[in-house]
Amino acid sequence: MPRKISLVCVSGTHEKLQMAAMFASVAAASGDDVSVFLSMNAVLPFVKGRGEALDEGPFGALLGTKGVPPYRDLFQMAAEIGGARIQPCSMALDLIKAEAGDLDPMLGPPTGLTKFLSDAEGAQVFTF
Amino acid sequence: MSATKVIDARNTFCPGPLMELITHMRLAHVGDVVELLSTDSGSATDIPEWTKKVGHEMLGIEQQGDTWHLKVRKAK
């Protein structure tokens, strides 16, 4: 039976986005029902002109090593192969005044907390 | 007719080898065998676990030097 897994990403660091993307891709590819909620600094790398994820420590730089799958590719695979829903937080997008055209195409529609919590009912929740 | 395809995922890091395998399994026909080459030691446990979970058949796991050879048959 598929597990229901919700990932809440609030950090914009490379390390935490990488870990979340690894969870998302492996779980989605294994048939689990995966949703990812991107808020606070975690949404910024997915908005045009808002920069890339920042390295928090030594591992951040190591993640740029050849052969390490980039977090963006892993989220994309989670969505394409496993049907993962990558949902940006509507509040965060409002605060930075992001328009729909500014968002990475892999993202689903902006989502509020009430909707996310409703969708996440009964799920294993991981926070990054 | 079934076929065997070798996927060279050496020198990629977790979950790269698994993602390579999944990509090729999607393109394979039922009965085809995919042999994955990986230098990621986690593949030795992760690939059998994924194979079991999604219902394919693990045919063999063998380490030659620093390379793992993992053979999977597409079962559905």
Image (tube, grey):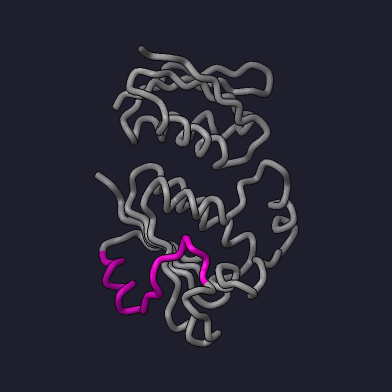
Residue range corresponding to the magenta coloring:
A103-121
Q: Quadrant of the N terminus of chain A?
A: top left
- Measuring from the top left, give residue A77's x and y in whole percent: 48, 48
Residue situated furthest front in the rendering: A101
> Is residue A49 placed above or below A95 in the rendered structure?
above
Q: Is residue A89 left or right of residue A116?
A: right
Q: Residue at x 33, y 72 (%)?
A: A116
Q: Is residue B11 left or right of residue A96?
A: right
Residue A109 falls inside the magenta stretch: yes
- Dominant SS type (magenta): loop
Q: Is residue A99 left or right of residue B73?
A: right
- Measuring from the top left, give residue A54's x and y in whole percent: 69, 67
> Is residue B10 placed above or below A1 in the rendered structure?
above
> Is residue A59 placed above or below B13 in the rendered structure?
below
Residue situated furthest top in the rendering: B1
- Measuring from the top left, give residue A42's x and y in whole percent: 55, 70
> Is residue A57 placed above or below A64 in the rendered structure?
below
Q: Residue at x 28, y 47 (%)?
A: A2
Residue B62 falls inside the magenta stretch: no
- Measuring from the top left, give residue B48's x and y in whole percent: 43, 29
* Along the viewing direction, whichever of B31 and A121 lies nearer the viewer: B31
Tell me how many marks there are.
0
* Along the viewing direction, whichever of B37 and A127 lies nearer the viewer: B37
